[in-house]
Each structure stands twice: as C-alpha cells, then as structure tokens.
Image: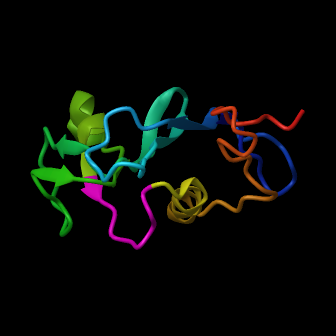
Amino acid sequence: MQVIPEDEDGVPIQGLSFLLQWKPDQDSLTTPGVSYPKINIVALYNKKRVFAVDTYPFDKHKNSYKIDRNDYQESIYGAHFHVYYEEAGYYSEKIGFPIISDIKPDDLAGYWKYFCKQLNVTCLGKMPLPLEDESGQIGLGL
C-alpha cells in the first residue's frame, strides 16, 4: 500500500510518500502454528529512502558504514529502523539501528504507530489490516 501524506491543509506533500509492505511468513524459525509476517514501512522523499522500519524478528542486518550514535551496532538481529545519512552515500540505505520496544512481531498497526511517531506524523483514520478478510492482501477500502 502506498500513502501520499498531506500537510495540515490537506495538500499532498510534494515528493514524500510512504510504502507499507506486508508479506506472510514463509521461513519462520518459530514454534509450529506461530507465524511472523515480514513488515516493511518506508518513507521515500523524491524516491530516496529516508526512513524505514523492518520488523521481521529473524532478520539479521549488518551495517556497512559506521555512524557516530550511541545505539550503533555492527550487526542487528530482529526489528530495526533505517535513517538516511548523506555522508554515507550509497551505504546510507544500509545503516540500521535496533528498535527497542515491546511491539509484537506481527503487530502491523503497532509498527505503523512507531513509524509515524518517529517521523512526527499524525495518521487519521484506521489502516486496513492484512487478513482482515482472510485474503492475505491489504484492502484498499474503495
């Protein structure tokens, strides 16, 4: 699902878009009967990823560029976010930081709230959730 954010007057913000991707779990390492979807929420500005949230609890992310931040780690296991750094150039999209929260791995709405809070965005309305109608697809509410 792609979302075009608007300013307080309802005017679309030029060049900014949010992309929400949800994939059913295909290779979980968890207990039988428990499934963790792969959720990616991305903020694009002029087609450049400036912020992203990756939620899969079994992802292993390796940073390719060192950033001077207290929460920097060479490798991250589990949910993490990405922030754009101009100084990192090509490697900027590969810089990740751990998400420290109690959000459950399958909580799409919880990670959406986290994403919005980090970007200082207010979401109006209810996000359609995958599997609400058991189709496995996010509904568009048309």
Q: Is residue 121 left or right of residue 110?
A: right
Q: Farthest front residue?
A: 32
Comparing 87 with 43, the one in front is 43
Q: Position of residue 81 (x, y in %)?
A: 36, 52
Q: Is residue 28 left or right of residue 19?
A: left
In the rendered image, the vertical position of residue 5 relative to residue 24, given as above or below: below
Indicate whether residue 82 is drawn in magenta.
Answer: no
Q: Position of residue 121 (x, y in %)?
A: 64, 60
Image quarter of residue 69:
bottom left
Pick the quarter of the image with the C terminus.
Answer: top right
Pick the quarter of the image with the N terminus.
Answer: top right
In the image, the segment drawn in magenta is 97-105
Q: Residue at x 42, y 49 (%)?
A: 33
Q: Residue at x 36, y 47 (%)?
A: 56
Q: Residue at x 26, y 56 (%)?
A: 97
| Main secondary structure along the magenta-highlighted residues | loop
In the rendered image, the vertical position of residue 65 relative to residue 80, given as above or below: above
User: What color scheme is it?
Assistant: rainbow
Comparing 110 with 30, the one in front is 30
How many circles with numbers are drawn on the protein?
A: 0
Image quarter of residue 85:
top left
Q: Position of residue 9 (x, y in %)?
A: 87, 53
Q: Position of residue 133 (x, y in %)?
A: 75, 40
Image quarter of residue 46:
top right
Q: Residue at x 63, y 32 (%)?
A: 15
